[in-house]
């Protein structure tokens, strides 16, 4: 019995950690865009927040740093390969 409880606790911990890491990625991307370009439109924020793949989020963070304009970032996000969002 304790084994099942421990497994459930560990699974919950891993899921919480994964969600926390995604939240950190979202905040880093959006804060970078805000610092570089000013107000981030709500629709763009929502588009970033539906991305579920950690590698894609890491790539989007780099793009947020390197994109010359907010429009460039938006265009790349729109053209991202399928599977990036839930």
Image: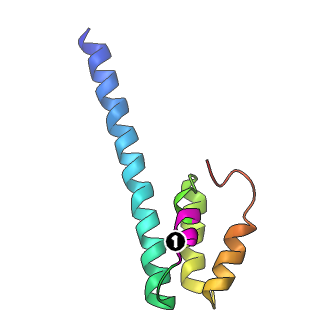
Percent across and percent down for residue 47 are 59, 64
Q: Is residue 68 shown above or below 63?
A: below
Asked if residue 43 is among those painted magenta in the image, a careful observer would answer: yes
Percent across and percent down for residue 49 are 52, 60
Q: Is residue 2 shown above or below 18?
A: above
- Residue position for label 1: 42
- SS at circle 1: helix
Question: How many numbered callouts?
Answer: 1
> Magenta stretch: dominant SS?
helix
Q: Nearer the viewer, residue 79 or 12?
A: 79
Residue 3 left/right relative to 48: left
Residue 59: quadrant of the picture: bottom right
Residue 14: quadrant of the picture: top left
Percent across and percent down for residue 30 are 47, 74
> Which color mode does the image show?
rainbow
Q: Residue at x 50, y 81 (%)?
A: 33
Query: In this view, which residue lies farthest toward the left?
Result: 2
Query: In this view, which residue lies farthest toward the front?
Result: 42
Residue 5: quadrant of the picture: top left
Image quadrant where one finds the N terminus: top left
Asked if residue 49 is among those painted magenta in the image, a careful observer would answer: no
Q: Is residue 49 shown above or below 64?
A: above
Q: Residue at x 39, y 62 (%)?
A: 24
Other-residue count near label 1 (Cα within 10 Å), few / some / many at <14 / 14–19 / ≥20: few
Q: Is residue 26 shown above or below 4?
A: below
Percent across and percent down for residue 13 are 32, 37
Q: Nearer the viewer, residue 49 or 11?
A: 49
Q: Nearer the viewer, residue 82 or 62?
A: 82
Question: What span is in magenta?
Answer: 41-47
Q: Residue at x 61, y 61 (%)?
A: 56
């Amino acid at each position: 019995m304790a084994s099942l409880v421990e497994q459930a606790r560990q699974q919950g911990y891993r899921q919480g950690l994964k969600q926390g890491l995604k939240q950190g990625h979202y905040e880093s991307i959006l804060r970078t865009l805000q610092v570089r370009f000013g107000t981030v439109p709500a629709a763009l924020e929502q588009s970033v927040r539906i991305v579920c793949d950690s590698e894609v989020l890491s790539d989007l963070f780099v793009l947020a740093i390197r994109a010359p304009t907010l429009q460039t970032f938006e265009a790349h996000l729109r053209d991202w390969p399928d599977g990036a969002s839930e």
